[in-house]
Amino acid sequence: MDVHVADLFGYHALQIGPVQLDALQTNRMPHRWRACLNIEENRGQLMLDPEDLPFPAESLDLVVLSHVLEFSVDPHQVIREVERVLIPEGHILVTGFNPYSLWGLRQRTLRGIRKPYLPEEGEFLTLFRLRDWMKLLSFEIQHSKAGCYIPALSQQKWIERWSWMDRLGSRWWPFAGGAYAVDAVKRVRGMRLIGPSWKTAKPKPGTAVPAANTNAQCINTQEDMDEG
């Protein structure tokens, strides 16, 4: 996230999600806000509903959704709202947990047996599904990357022993990381008037002129004579 947002320029940037993650710390836009989703975690500057953003249309240059979609009642509406408030060529960055990973596998197979490794109330989206949603809303994917390929471990010594999976994962199983990040740009298609695809055919020699055209020619001739 630090690498992606560092080179994004503009005036207004918004981060939605847990405030423990400061996704805008390397960004240099003059106006940056960090928003929470509920009052229990209200340690940010704003508290809002991501499905109904309190910003006018085309007013933000960058929106970061940090683990927001998987905990939203209507994640597709969240993306629509972001599309509304972003300026043309504005950026959206999304992070999420990958259900097709070792983390997601443990979450599904051990549900109700052991303490969940990921938040239990989350409905995790696949990277492919998220990309399809963005394309439908005229977002163009710039970068997408997964990470965290090690198993669902909590002790530091075991994390270090399995760290070799992170080195090989991006090469051998790039879509199986426990978490992913997507960077997309809002594209606005321009419109231009297109003339009719047909051309008026010129009458062939000897072809009778339609009555409407004959009358029009007679009227024009009479007007010319009156003016003369």
Image (tube, helix red, strand yellow):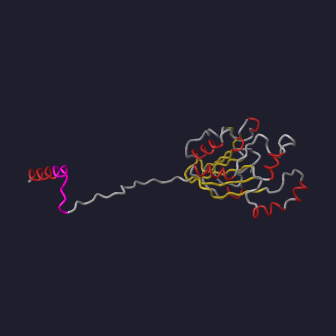
Residue 135: image location, x then y, percent? 59, 52
Residue 37: image location, x then y, percent? 71, 39
79, 218: nearer the viewer: 218
Residue 98: image location, x then y, percent? 74, 51
Query: Is 160 on the left-hand or right-hand side of 4?
Result: right
Please say whether residue 194 is one of the residues in the magenta stretch.
no
Q: Residue at x 67, y 49 (%)?
A: 64
Q: Residue at x 12, y 53 (%)?
A: 221
User: Quick one: quadrant of the N terminus?
Assistant: bottom right
Residue 113: image location, x then y, percent? 87, 41
Corner quadrant of residue 205: bottom left
User: Quick one: quadrant of the C terminus?
Assistant: bottom left
Q: Residue at x 82, y 46 (%)?
A: 109
Total marks drawn?
0
Please say whether residue 211 is one of the residues in the magenta stretch.
yes
Q: Residue furthest top?
A: 39
Query: Is 169 on the left-hand or right-hand side of 69?
Result: right
159, 25: nearer the viewer: 159
Q: Residue at x 82, y 48 (%)?
A: 106
Q: Which residues are magenta?
A: 205-216
91, 131: nearer the viewer: 131
